Structure formats: C-alpha cells, structure tokens
Amino acid sequence: MPACPKCGHLNPDYSRFCQSCGASLGPESFGQYHPSTTPSARQGISDVQKIIIVVAVILVVIIVVGAIAASFLLSLNSVSRTSSLSAPIVITGVNAQMSYANPSATYFGPQTQSLGGSGLPLQLQYGQSFYYSFSLRMGGLYQTHTIDSVYLSTPGFDLLSVSPTLPYAMSSGSSVTLTITGEAPSQNYYGAITIIISTH
C-alpha cells in the first residue's frame, strides 16, 4: 500500500492520488512507506513460530540426551562382568561334586551341591593364591567314611594344598571344615569354580 508523501495516508495499491489530501501518488511514490505509520513488511518470527522452534529444540535435546543415556546403559550391559570389576579373575561361587565310592551314597549330601561361603565374589589377579574354607557334615547312622582327596576341576585353576591333611576319617554326625589353597589361572575368568571331593 503506497503512503502519501505529503500526509502519510496509506492508500490502496491501485491509487494514483491520495484519498486523504489528493496529492499525486506518481510512479515514484509507489512502494514508499512512512516508517511511523507503515508496519514493516517483515516483522521477524511470529510468536507461533517461536513456540514451534522452542518445542523442536527441546525435543532434539531430549532425543540426544536419551540416546546418550541409552548408549551408556547398553555399553554397561554389554561389557563383560569380568572387565567391569577391578580384577581379571572373579570367583562368584564354589560348587562341590561329591565322588562317592557307591553312586547311591549321600552321606555328605547330594552329589552336586553349592558350597556358598563368605567372601564371594572373590576377585583375584593372574596367578594369585587364594584360600577358601567350607564345611562338610556327615550324615547316616553308625558309619565311618573317609575324605580321600580334593581337587579343583575348573580349567586353569590349580590346587596347592588342603587342610586338614587328607585322607581324613569321619564318623556319623561329625563335621569338618576344609580349607583349600588354590592358584588363579593366567587368563580372565568369571564364574563359579568346581571342587571334586572323593570319598569312600
């Protein structure tokens, strides 16, 4: 809308003369606007556009933060438990495999059992010696049996000693606490170890 150069009145685009004062709105007047009376053709970003931009920025930030958090959590889950601990060898439990002379015997309990114990998980360095104590109680009536040998069957682990000295004779209702000294392997390990206990 052309503004009158004389009075500043806004006139329709097709006007050649000012509708207010009659001044000529010649071709040189078209497109001229009086800054105090004519709004700018470009007022910048509207309020709706500002809200849309702010919402979009917030959504992008939420997505990026969520992706970073998900990536971090996935990386924690995908890292092996061995590497997430401070030691390369972690013994999480101790299982016993009872080797009875008579396969139906159970005087020290079931043939396969979890010994549990305190101090687990046990974190070790390569080749480090460790101690583990566990108790066996003999059931049955009026029987005598002997613990003949104990050894570690988990590959890489070595049994260094057993206390008390074997063979060890026991009678019904008695119990013994055995302490083994072992040596950790030279490669990473995470899990339970198995002790084979031979008895007759």
Image (cartoon, grey):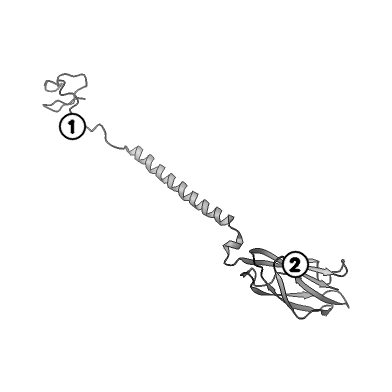
Q: Nearer the viewer, mark 1 or mark 2?
A: 2
Q: Quadrant of residue 59?
A: top left
Viewer-side residue, 166 vs 35: 166
Q: Residues within 10 Å of mark 2 (few under 14, many from 20)?
A: some
Q: Quadrant of residue 200?
A: bottom right
For image coordinates 79% across by 71% down, the residue present is: 197
Q: Which residue is denoted by mark 2 in the rendering? A: 153
For image coordinates 48% across by 51% down, the residue present is: 68
Q: How many angstroms separate mark 1 from mark 2 (CA)?
A: 96 Å
Q: Is residue 166 left or right of residue 45?
A: right
Q: Is residue 120 left or right of residue 3?
A: right
Q: Which residue is denoted by mark 1 in the rendering? A: 37
Viewer-side residue, 135 vs 10: 135
Label 2 sits on a secondary structure element that is loop
Label for residue 160? none
Amino acid carrying label 1: it is Thr
Which quadrant is the N terminus positioned in?
A: top left
Query: Residue 135, position in %: x, y?
Result: 74, 75
Query: Residue 136, position in %: x, y?
Result: 77, 74
Q: Is residue 28 left or right of residue 187?
A: left
Across the whole image, how many numbered discs are drawn on residues?
Answer: 2
Q: Residues within 10 Å of mark 1 (few under 14, many from 20)?
A: few
For image coordinates 63% across by 66% down, the residue present is: 89
For image coordinates 88% across by 69% down, the residue present is: 102
